Amino acid sequence: MNITAQMVKELRDKTGAGMMDAKKALVETDGDMEKAIEVLRQKGMASADKKMGRIAAEGLIASAVTDTCGAMVEVNCETDFVAKNEEFKELAKCLAEGVAEKNPADVDAFLNSNCPKCGKAISEVIKEKIASIGEKITFRRFVRYEGNTATYIHNGKIGVLIQTDKKDAELMNDICLHIASSAPEFISRSEIPQSVIDHETEIEMGKEDLQKKPEAIRAKIVEGRVNKLMSHRCLLEQPFIKNPDITVGQLIEGKLTIKAFTRYMLGEGIEKKQENFAEEVMSQVKG
C-alpha cells in the first residue's frame, strides 16, 4: 500500500511520534492507522498527552443548570470568528436551556421539537441562524442529568457536567474544575470494562523493554503498569488538582457521591477540511 504524507501527518498528530517512526509503523501495518498507533505505543513512541482522534473543530460548549436538572451541549460552526460572535453564543446558550427544559430523547428529537422562546422548530431556528451568520451550524450532541448538578465551561472549548447525590456548590465546582483539567474517563475502577483492561495488557505485554524478561516477571510488571494506567483514568483515584496530596475520592469522602459526569472537548473526533494554503495561493497567481 502507498503510504502518503497525509497518512504520516495524521498518525503524527494522533500520537506525537516522529515522522520516520510514524512512516515505519504505517509500512509495518500496511497503512492500518489503528494498528500503527498500537505499534508506536508498544515501542513507547506515542506521547501520553496526545489523544487519539482529537482534531479541532470550531464552535462552543454551553450548559444550563436549574434547581432540578443540568444540560450541556456542543454546537459547531466553521470558524473561530463565528464562535466568538454574540449571536452564536446566544444560540448555544438557548439550545442548552432548551435541552434542560425539554429532556429530549436524542438529537433528532430535540431538533424536531419547538423552541421554548419563539415556538418555532429548533431545526428552523438553526437554519435561520445559518442564513443570518453565513456559516454552517450544527447541533452535535448533548447530555442531561436530573437532580443535583453542576457545570464548568472553559473558554467554550472544554465543558463538564456532573450529577451528585447532595448539593455542595463549592465542592461540586472543584470537582468540575478537576475533571476539566485531568480528563478522567470513569468514576471508579468498577466501571472499567474488562475489554479495556485486556487491551492495555496486550499493549504492555508487547513493549520491547520487557521482551527479554522471564514470563512470570513480565506478567507482574505488566499488571503493575496496567493498574497504574487504570488509576489515572478513574476520577476517584486521581490526585486532586488543587491538592495533589489527596485523591478526589478522599476529598469527597463522607460529603457527597458522584453519580455521573460528562466531559466534552470541542470538536473531538471531527475531521476538519485539510487546507493547503501554498496550493491555494499558487492557483490564484496562475488564475
Image (spheres, grey):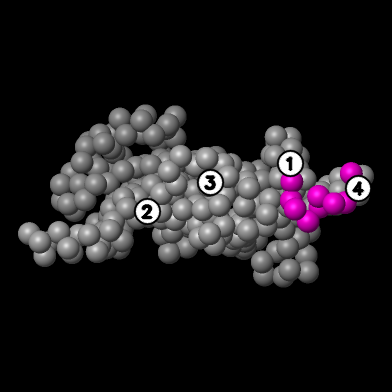
Q: Which residue is mark 4?
A: 214
Characterize the local packing of mark 4: few (<14), some (14-19) or many (20 or more) Cα atoms within 10 angstroms.
few
Q: Provide the residue designation for mark 2.
A: 57
Displayed quadrant of residue 178: bottom right
Q: Amino acid at mark 2?
A: Ala
Q: Earlier in the sequence, mark 3 or mark 1?
A: 3
Q: Which residue is mark 3?
A: 27
Q: Is residue 188 magenta?
A: no
What amino acid is found at the position of numbered circle 4 in the picture?
Pro
From mark 1 to mark 4, how far is it between C-alphas? 16 Å
Seen from the viewer's position, the closer of residues 73 and 190 is 190
N-terminal label among 4 and 2: 2
Q: Earlier in the sequence, mark 3 or mark 2?
A: 3
Q: Amino acid at mark 3?
A: Val
- What's the magenta region? 206-215
Helix, strand or loop status at disc 1:
helix
